[in-house]
Image (cartoon, helix red, strand yellow):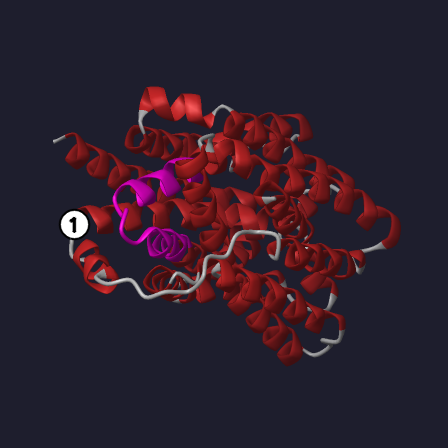
Amino acid sequence: MIGLYYFSFFGALGIFLPYFSLWLVAQGMLPSQATRVLSLIPLMALCVPPLTGLAADARRLRGWLLRLGSVATAVAFLGFLRARTTHELWLATALFCFFRAPLTSLVDATTLAHVHHHGGSYGRIRLWGSLGFLVAAAATGAAIDRVGVGVIVHAASWGLGACAVVSFALPAAPPSAREGVVGAWLHRLGELDTWLFILAAAFAQMATAAYDSGFSLHLARLGFGGRFIGAAWATGVAAEILLLAASGWILARIGAARLFTLTLLTAVVRWTLLAQVRSPVAILCLQPLHGVTFGLFWVSGVTLARDRNTETPTAAQGLFSAAIGIGSLGGMNVAGLLLERGGGRLLYSAAAVCAALGALCAWAYAHRQRK
């Protein structure tokens, strides 16, 4: 059932994330305004996942918070069906992002606990989320060409509703207090290694934000339609699925810290090349690198967070989400502006610089772990 939750949740995001900026522009916003609205997603991730995770660990509330958050997210998303003015769009986005923020860290912690007790691979379960994203992104791109961008909000509403229903089939232990959780958490926050990890993840996601919020707009500026945009997203996610399936084998041979660094070095190459290419064939040939820069990046990141925080596993995943949120917040707030002023060349050149800074932090973290 965890795989089904991933499939429905990331399927809804596969409808929403690649195309929501297009929908906002269709409502009359400029690209820079649209990407600023999208920055509410990482803004909520700065504080909600760590605090929710700490409460989940201290009171054994992880399953119950996952259910409550899934239902609240689905209900909040319905606000987009009525939002018309800019202020209403901001409000609807803020409510949706607030309730959605802790869901990834909560379900990731649930999955890691399941793997610990029952065996298996985190990546092989998590790939169902990528598969849902792939199917939804490809189908939505084709649907936009046929019926327009209005399909985005309606289809995503159904996906989030399905996710809320599935959440009640996931385990939820009876609540009970646990001693020493806050102290263990504060101790980890005082370590240099923790902050090197946070910085590496933040810089990596700052670069990836140029992809999440600007890739569809970049392709549209190059003259490509919804079908090609959907195919490009789907190609990247297909590679992600394949590498998630093999992630257990890869982790065992490379190690989480070295793999984390390798994914960031790959990101430098990916964004540098994307800044230069214009042909559809070249763009599609670069998309399989998404399997490394997101799929293996995420697997190695959650693994490092788990291995160093055994007493506060949910809060640790929340901290990883917060690091992602920091990077996304910075990246999304400037992605649209960079795209307007210098096109994809400027946007993805800046992304390559951010990825290089992240790779440096990741290398320092891995070096300290080896010592």
Front residue of this view, candidates 249 and 221:
249
Q: Which residue occupies the extreme left position in the image?
A: 371
For label 1, the SS is helix
The answer to if 306 sits in the magenta stretch is yes
Quarter residue 278 falls in: top right
Q: Which residues are magenta?
A: 297-324
Compared to 161, does 222 lie above or below? above
Relative image position of residue 234 (x, y in whole percent): 66, 36
Q: Could you tell me what secondary structure mostly forms the magenta stretch? A: helix
Relative image position of residue 206 (x, y in whole percent): 42, 50
* Quadrant holding the N terminus: top right
Relative image position of residue 194 (x, y in whole percent): 23, 49
Q: In the drawing, does residue 60 fall left or right of residue 2? A: left
Q: Which residue occupies the extreme right position in the image?
A: 146
Residue denoted by label 1: 192
Quarter residue 74 falls in: bottom right
